[in-house]
Every structure is written in structure tokens, then in C-alpha cells.
Image: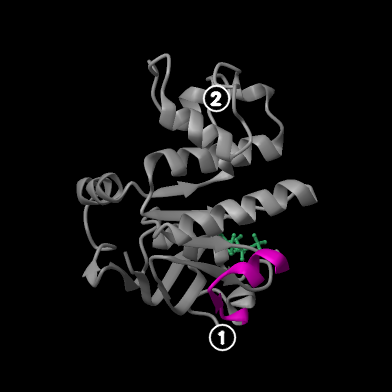
């Protein structure tokens, strides 16, 4: 899927967070949203993920406008494309590793796909463990296991390598690259130079977003 922002603006509480952002995120590629703190990387990621409605411009998926659709159409979009937006990993702490990977209970005793996916992210054999027992790096990998299991067409990730050690960072970067190579549209908001270097495409946000004056003021 080609997910695009066309001249997108976002204003929240009379404050302009984004103005005139356009980016094309292609399938089979990993796109980095890059720029200084507060320039709106997360805001653009959430807008691409239809979690925020742009106040100007539009979001299209394979050329069709998706940002102007209602709640039901958005849910259908996410279901059809198995898209995943990872916000703070989205881990349900009280539930097991298997639940978090599948996002449902009642996994069959032997699910070879789940086993293979957990093996890929270094969590093999830990299906029954509560997610609360995992470290930050393991939770991040578990969140990616969910995307791998769902065979997500679209994966939007905020700061996927923040606060990880070098080994975990490399693993997460390799996983994201592998998901993109498999044909998914992967978008990351990041400050990580190594991750940025791995991306196929870099979108630099308007630095002026970081200091944009409140709407209506000079
Ligand atoms: N829901 C909201 N309500 C009010 N202000 C918001 C909201 N979401 C974001 N902002 C503001 O928008 C600006 C951009 O935030 P955003 O998190 O998108 O930046 P960022 O580039 O991802 O920053 P960082 O690199 O530090 O994570 C910030 O000043 C933030 O306070």
C-alpha cells in the first residue's frame, strides 16, 4: 500500500502542530520521519495512522482518501490492511506473551506460526509468561511479534529503538527492515541515526513546526 500525506496540517487547541506536510510511504520500504524534538513526527505518524484527523490536507491509501472517512470506515481500513500503530508498545501487562502477540485469548496449544514469530523476536518458549515480567526491550520485540503474526500491510512505529541497548536496537532495526522487505509499508518516527540510515526514504519535517506560533497570532 502507498500511504500518503498531502499538504497535511494539524491544529490542536488553536496551536499549529503541522503545516504543509507531504510524504509518500511505499510498500516494501521503510520511511523515516525525521526532525528535531517537537517538530511533529509523532503527530504526523498518528495522522497517517488515522488516529488524528488533519485540519488541512488529506491522507490517501493507494490514492483513495481515507482521512475524511467515518469511524466505521477507518476500522474497516485497519482490519482489511491489518495495520498496526504502536504507541508505547501497546502491551497489555496483565496478559501473557501469547495473548499480546495474538491479541486474543484461547490460543491453541500448538500454534506453529506463533512459535515461529516468537522465535524471530527472541521470545521462544515464553508464551505463558505475563507480559509484565518482560523488560522494555522484550516488550518492544513482543509488539513487533504482533505485527509479524498479523502479517501487517502497514506498520507505524514511534521511536522503536529509544532506550534499547545496542543488541536490542540492532534486532529491532533488522526486524523492521525484514517486515518492509516482506512488502509492508513501514513508517518510523525516530531520532536514531542507525535506524534512519537503514530506512529507504527519509522525510524531514518542517523545522518551523517546532516553533510554530499559535494560529491567528503573528
Ligand atoms: N494532543 C495534543 N495536544 C496538545 N499539544 C500536542 C498534542 N499532541 C502533540 N502536541 C504538541 O505538538 C508538538 C509536536 O509533538 P510531537 O510529539 O508530534 O513531536 P515529535 O517531533 O514527535 O517530538 P519528539 O522528537 O520529542 O518525540 C509538541 O509541542 C506537543 O506538545
Residue at the extreme right of the image, as rendered: 165
Q: Which residue appears at 45% of the width and 29% of the height?
A: 114
User: Which numbered disc, 2 or 1, marks the residue closer to the eye?
Assistant: 2
Q: Quadrant of ligand 1?
A: bottom right
Q: Which range is magenta?
A: 193-207
Label 2 residue near ligand 1, CB within 8 Å:
no
Q: Mark 2: few, some, or many residues within 10 Å (few <14, many ≥20)? A: many
Q: Earlier in the sequence, mark 2 or mark 1?
A: 2
In front here: 200 or 211?
A: 200
In front here: 46 or 113?
A: 113
Quadrant of the rendering where the N terminus is positioned: bottom left
Q: Is residue 115 left or right of residue 27?
A: right
Q: Which residue appears at 55% of the width and 73% of the height?
A: 214
Q: Mark 2 points at which residue?
A: 97
Q: Which residue appears at 61% of the width and 81% of the height?
A: 208
Q: Is residue 7 left or right of residue 32?
A: left
- CB within 8 Å, label 2 to label 1: no
Q: Name the residue under label 1.
A: 218
Q: Position of residue 65 (x, y in %)?
A: 23, 68
Instruction: Identify the secondary structure beneath mark 2.
Output: helix
Q: Where is residue 133 in the image (x, y as percent from the top left)?
A: 68, 22
Q: Which residue appears at 59% of the width and 39% of the height?
A: 121
Image vertical order of residue 100 relative to residue 80, above or below: above
State whether residue 159 appears in this view. no
Which numbered disc covers residue 168? none
Q: Where is residue 110 in the image (x, y as percent from the top left)?
A: 42, 18
Is residue 148 located in the magenta-colored stretch of the structure? no
Amino acid at each position: 500500500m502507498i500511504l500518503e500525506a498531502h499538504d497535511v496540517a494539524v491544529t490542536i487547541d488553536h496551536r499549529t502542530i503541522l503545516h504543509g506536510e507531504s510524504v509518500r510511504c511505499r510498500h516494501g520500504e521503510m520511511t523515516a520521519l525525521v526532525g528535531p524534538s517537537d517538530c511533529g513526527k509523532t503527530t504526523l505518524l498518528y495522522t497517517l495512522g488515522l488516529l488524528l484527523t488533519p485540519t488541512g490536507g488529506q491522507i490517501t491509501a493507494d490514492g483513495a482518501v481515507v482521512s475524511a472517512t467515518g469511524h466505521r470506515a477507518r476500522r474497516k481500513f485497519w482490519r482489511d490492511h491489518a495495520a498496526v500503530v504502536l504507541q508505547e508498545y501497546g502491551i497489555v501487562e496483565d496478559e501473557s506473551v501469547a495473548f499480546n502477540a495474538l491479541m486474543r485469548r484461547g490460543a491453541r496449544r500448538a500454534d506453529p506460526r506463533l512459535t515461529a514469530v516468537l522465535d524471530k523476536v527472541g521470545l521462544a518458549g515464553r508464551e505463558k509468561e505475563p507480559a509484565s515480567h518482560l523488560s522494555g526491550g522484550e516488550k518492544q520485540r513482543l509488539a513487533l511479534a504482533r505485527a509479524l503474526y498479523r502479517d501487517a500491510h502497514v506498520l507505524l512505529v514511534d521511536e522503536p529503538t529509544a532506550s534499547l541497548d545496542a543488541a536490542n536496537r540492532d534486532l529491532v532495526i533488522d526486524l523492521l527492515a525484514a517486515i518492509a522487505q516482506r512488502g509492508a509499508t513501514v513508517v518510523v518516527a525516530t531520532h536514531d541515526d542507525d535506524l534512519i540510515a537503514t530506512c529507504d526514504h527519509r522525510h524531514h519535517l518542517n523545522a518551523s513546526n517546532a516553533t510554530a506560533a499559535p494560529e491567528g497570532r503573528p
